[in-house]
Image (tube, helix red, strand yellow):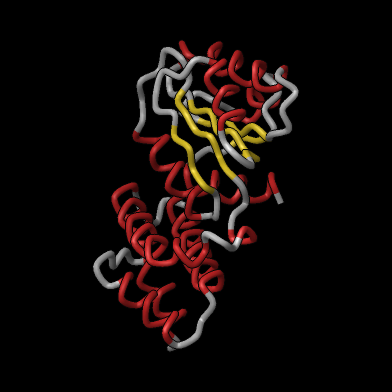
């Protein structure tokens, strides 16, 4: 098994402590950083699919995401100059009136693992703040808005409409327990994801 294959296998089962060393070994063997990153992204896609189908649950997914984050830390200095490794910046936040962040944090980790630079605005984010963040950060290609309460559905709608009205060229993905694909389409979002695993896949599709 090549070192890249080993990295891939260990990320999938969340061997956090082993990943930095394995990533370094793969680099020492001459594997390009972007290929190692891609292997980890592929691994997280498998994890995301297993999560979506109910084979694994949140703890396993978090462990795998943490393992990948450790690997990304080793690669980051090498990827900094390689813009092709990044799909751009993704702004993420839970909309105004909603203080849930576990789902958002999971989605953030998964979208980051797909190759985005993440800017997390936290919870209870007003619509205008999303627009400000797009202007403040470079190369923003995606905004992810999360809403987990039915009462904050109007805030989700306002966030999407405000971002769209700003005329800034970004894609907007929405998600959260009460959100449906129909509602996402109705409020003008470009995409919808039912869970963190599919959010990463969708995010990649949307900006490709």
**Residue lying at the far left of the rendered structure:** 17
Q: Position of residue 20 (x, y in %)?
A: 32, 70
Residue 110 vs 170, above or below: the answer is below
Q: Residue drawn at (42%, 12%), measured in percent from left and top?
A: 97
Residue 16 vs 151, above or below: the answer is below
Q: Position of residue 60 (x, y in %)?
A: 31, 55
Q: Residue drawn at (62%, 51%), measured in percent from left and top?
A: 87
Question: Observer-nearest residue: 92 or 50?
Answer: 92
Q: How many marks?
A: 0
Question: Observer-nearest residue: 176 or 180?
Answer: 176
In which image quadrant can residue 28 be found? bottom left
Q: Position of residue 30 (x, y in %)?
A: 50, 85
The quadrant of the image that shows the N terminus is bottom left
Q: Residue drawn at (75%, 23%), measured in percent from left and top?
A: 167
Q: Residue drawn at (39%, 35%), measured in percent from left and top?
A: 103
Residue 26 vs 147, above or below: the answer is below
Question: Observer-nearest residue: 109 or 79?
Answer: 79
Side of 74 relative to 86 (left or right): left
Side of 8 relative to 132 (left or right): left
Q: Position of residue 31 (x, y in %)?
A: 51, 81
């Amino acid at each position: 098994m090549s070192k890249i294959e080993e990295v891939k296998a260990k990320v999938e089962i969340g061997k956090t402590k082993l990943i930095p060393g394995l990533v370094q070994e793969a680099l020492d063997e001459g594997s390009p950083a972007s290929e190692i990153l891609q292997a980890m992204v592929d691994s997280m896609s498998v994890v995301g699919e297993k999560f979506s189908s109910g084979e694994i649950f949140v703890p396993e997914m978090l462990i795998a995401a943490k393992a990948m984050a450790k690997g990304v830390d080793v690669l980051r200095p090498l990827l900094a100059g390689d813009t092709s490794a990044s799909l751009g910046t993704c702004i993420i936040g839970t909309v105004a009136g909603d203080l849930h962040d576990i789902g958002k944090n999971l989605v953030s980790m998964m979208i980051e693992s797909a190759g985005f630079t993440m800017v997390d605005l936290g919870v209870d984010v007003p619509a205008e703040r999303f627009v400000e963040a797009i202007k403040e950060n470079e190369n923003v290609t995606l905004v992810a808005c999360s809403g987990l309460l039915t009462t904050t559905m109007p805030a989700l709608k306002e966030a999407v409409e405000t971002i769209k009205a700003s005329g800034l060229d970004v894609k907007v993905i929405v998600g959260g327990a009460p959100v449906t694909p129909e509602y996402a389409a109705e409020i003008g979002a470009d995409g919808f994801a039912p869970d963190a695993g599919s959010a990463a896949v969708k995010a990649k599709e949307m900006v490709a």
